[in-house]
Each structure stands twice: as structure tokens, then as C-alpha cells.
């Protein structure tokens, strides 16, 4: 499968690229800085661009079978629209090039999953992560209204632990530990691209 990954140099995006390549997929990584992509592979193409530049976004989508959006703002807590703007541009590019499968990573607590959070985590999201949550909310709205075959993946607290392959996935489920390895998020996403069991669903992944 030919897969385009946006946000490929983020910690989660990088794990997705690694796992996709290890399973024989052909990957196009869309990055702002190629030096931050420490992978060389015969099946990896790197396209340098900014998600606010639609021409380069569309270029990265042309000829693909699926698109994975792992856009984020790093550790910044400042107000941003990068997730929403980037995802909107990606959807536009998908329609232009007739690519219909989209996987998007947001966060547990976004949308309908808000009520699955503990009171402490609701306070945390509503204060420290207020700007991030607002961007994710509008990002999810754009995805749900896109008309493409979408799946939204909402991880609980991301960690850098190795892939376990053991996790819970479902709509609006409760988090037992409020943690999930990025490697397991990548595992779910790559599996779902083969199974297409979660089209039109926003699911939480957690341990």
C-alpha cells in the first residue's frame, strides 16, 4: 500500500513511518525539515513542505492509497490552528487526487470522549491544554464533514514504551491507566488500513 504520512517527524509520526516500512508499505513522509527524519529506506520518499502550502500538501497525496495525519504542535502550549489548517488542506488534496482513506490522530477527551475523562483530566485539558483541545475539536469537525473514508484515533497519554500489541480500542471507552505507547497507536493505525473495520468512527486507544 502507498501511504502518505503528515507529521512524520513527530514522535508518533516517526513510529508510524517505521512500522509501515517494516511491513512492506511504500511511504511518503511530509516534513518541514528532512534532517529530522533519521530513516533511509528504498520505499521511503521525503517531501519537504509546510502544511499551510497546499500545493506541496497535494503533491504528497497524489498517487497514494491512504493518508495518515499525525500533525501536532510539539510541546508548545501556545494557541495554534496547525492541526485544523493542515487537515483541511489534506482533505482538499485527497479530493483533488481521488484518495479516499484518511486516518487522523487527535486525543482522548476530544469530541464525544470528553465525558470519559476523570475530573482531574478535564481540569487539565480545560486549562493547560485548552488551545490544543480547541484545535483538535475543529480538526475533528473538518474530518467528520469531509465525505472521505475517515477514522479518528484518540490516544490516551502517549508514552515512548515499546510496542506491546495489547491495548483497548473503542468508542468512548474509559482509560484504565491513561497511557498508551506511541508504538501501539502506530500498530492500530497500520492494522486498520488493512482491515477497514473502523471507517466513520472516532475511537479511543488506551491500556
Image (cartoon, rainbow, N blue to C red):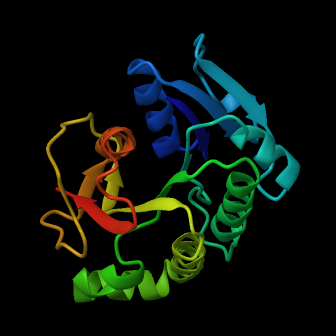
Residue at 72 percent of width and 68 percent of height: 85
Is 134 displayed left or right of 126 in the figure? Answer: right
The quarter of the displayed image where residue 2 is located: top right
The quarter of the displayed image where residue 61 is located: top right
Residue at 27 percent of width and 34 percent of height: 162
- The image shows residue 200 at horizontal and vertical percentages of 40, 67
Residue at 61 percent of width and 21 percent of height: 44
- The image shows residue 159 at horizontal and vertical percentages of 33, 49
The answer to whether 178 is drawn above or below residue 138 in the figure is above
Return the residue nearer the eye: 93 or 173. Answer: 93
On-image quarter of the C terminus: bottom left
> Does residue 8 show up?
no
Q: Which residue lies furthest to the front in this view?
A: 98
- The image shows residue 151 at horizontal and vertical percentages of 42, 60
Residue at 59 percent of width and 58 percent of height: 72
Q: How many numbered circles are shown? A: 0
The answer to whether 125 is drawn above or below residue 77 in the figure is below
The answer to whether 48 is drawn above or below residue 93 in the figure is above
Is 3 displayed left or right of 58 in the figure? Answer: left
Is 83 displayed left or right of 163 in the figure? Answer: right
Return the residue nearer the eye: 54 or 78. Answer: 54
Return the residue nearer the eye: 159 or 96. Answer: 96
- The image shows residue 129 at horizontal and vertical percentages of 49, 77
> Does residue 19 show up?
yes
Amino acid at each position: 500500500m502507498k501511504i502518505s504520512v503528515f507529521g512524520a517527524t513527530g514522535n508518533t509520526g516517526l513510529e508510524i513511518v517505521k512500522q509501515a516500512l517494516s511491513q512492506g508499505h511504500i511511504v511518503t513522509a511530509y516534513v518541514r525539515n528532512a534532517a529530522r527524519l533519521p530513516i533511509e529506506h528504498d520505499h521511503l520518499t521525503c517531501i519537504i513542505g509546510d502544511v499551510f502550502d497546499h500545493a506541496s500538501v497535494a503533491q504528497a497525496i497524489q498517487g497514494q492509497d491512504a493518508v495518515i495525519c499525525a500533525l501536532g504542535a510539539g510541546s508548545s502550549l501556545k494557541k495554534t490552528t496547525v492541526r485544523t489548517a493542515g487537515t483541511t488542506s489534506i482533505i482538499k488534496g485527497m479530493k483533488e487526487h481521488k484518495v479516499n482513506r484518511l486516518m487522523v490522530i487527535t486525543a482522548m477527551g476530544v469530541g464525544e470522549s470528553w465525558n470519559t475523562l476523570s475530573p482531574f483530566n478535564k481540569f487539565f485539558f480545560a486549562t493547560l491544554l485548552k488551545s490544543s483541545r480547541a484545535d483538535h475539536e475543529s480538526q475533528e469537525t473538518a474530518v467528520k464533514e469531509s465525505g472521505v473514508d475517515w477514522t479518528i484515533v484518540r490516544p490516551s497519554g502517549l508514552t515512548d514504551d515499546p510496542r506491546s500489541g495489547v491495548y483497548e480500542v473503542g468508542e468512548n471507552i474509559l482509560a484504565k491507566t491513561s497511557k498508551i505507547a506511541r508504538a501501539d497507536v502506530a500498530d492500530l493505525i497500520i492494522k486498520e488500513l488493512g482491515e477497514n473495520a473502523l471507517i466513520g468512527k472516532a475511537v479511543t486507544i488506551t491500556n
